[in-house]
Image (tube, helix red, strand yellow):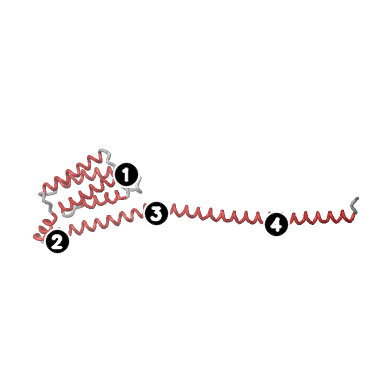
Amino acid sequence: MDAKPEDLSNSLKEIEEKINSFSSILEKFGLDIITKMGQTNLKITQLTDIVEDLNKSTIEIKGLKPQLSNVILNQKLVEDELSLIKSLIINITAPPAKRNELKNTIVRDESATGTKDLIINQLNDLKIQLENNNNDPQTVKTILEQIKEEIYEFTGGHRMLYEISQIITRLDSAGSLNDLMDEENPSSVTIKNQLIENITFWINKLMIKS
């Protein structure tokens, strides 16, 4: 039986309404997707900005490291210099009797000559180790600290103590003796070369020290 024109019209109208409704749903769904994508892109942009800020902060902090190292180094050098000046003042200003008393409190069992020879031998041994490529900063630091103590006991205070302290402080942050003595100066000599040069100078100073 053929459909009546009215029924056909109603069917077409229902189909159109359903199509319109479906189109509306698709449109809303599309808008939701676009909105979510926009929010996601915003979040990604914000995170990217945060990462860039963190990278900049990291670079700035790394840039401050040499300056902070210099501050620590200079502080230690000042402390060592003050300690040296104090010991020199005590030796200079103390009365002769008191000066002898102070000297007697730090003298080892060996004679002064024996102590001097011991220090010179230790310096020569260290120089040989350096020339034979001993590149361990901590090993050298331990040897220098012992030599520094013995020089102080032998001299009661000397410029050498300050120079040794400078190198010991540099060894604290060194990865190798082939590192530059001055990290910020590309033309600076290596710690090893500086130390070998100083050892020769220290031995000469000790040779003329009574």
In the depicted view, which residue is nearer to us: 8 or 135? Answer: 8
Q: Which mark is residue 176?
A: 1
Amino acid found under the numbered disc labelled 1: Ser
Q: Nearer the viewer, mark 4 or mark 1?
A: 4
Q: Spatial distance from mark 3 to mark 1, Cα to Cα? A: 22 Å
Q: Nearer the viewer, mark 3 or mark 4?
A: 4
Q: Which mark is residue 93?
A: 2
Asked if residue 69 lies left or right of residue 38, the reply is left
| Mark 4, other Cα within 10 Å: few <14 / some 14–19 / many ≥20 | few
| Mark 1, other Cα within 10 Å: few <14 / some 14–19 / many ≥20 | some
Q: Kindly check if marks 3 and 1 are in contact, taking CB atoms under 8 A apart as contact.
A: no
In the depicted view, which residue is nearer to us: 26 or 48? Answer: 26
Asked if residue 95 lies left or right of residue 63, the reply is left
Q: Spatial distance from mark 3 to mark 2, Cα to Cα? A: 43 Å
Identify which residue is drawn at 35% across, 45% down. Answer: 186
* Residue that carries the numbered disc 4 in the rendered image: 28
For label 1, the SS is: loop
Asked if residue 70 lies left or right of residue 160, the reply is right
Q: Which mark is residue 64?
A: 3
Q: Who comes first in sequence, dot 4 or dot 2?
A: 4
Q: Who comes first in sequence, dot 1 or dot 2?
A: 2
Q: Who comes first in sequence, dot 3 or dot 1?
A: 3
Q: Who comes first in sequence, dot 4 or dot 1?
A: 4
Q: Spatial distance from mark 4 to mark 1, Cα to Cα? A: 67 Å
Q: Spatial distance from mark 1 to mark 2, Cα to Cα? A: 42 Å
Residue 143 position within the rendered picture, expressed as x and y whole percent measured from the top left? 23, 47
Q: Kindly check if marks 4 and 2 are in contact, taking CB atoms under 8 A apart as contact.
A: no
Q: Who comes first in sequence, dot 3 or dot 2?
A: 3
Identify which residue is drawn at 31% across, 47% down. Answer: 181
For label 4, the SS is: helix
Q: Who comes first in sequence, dot 3 or dot 4?
A: 4
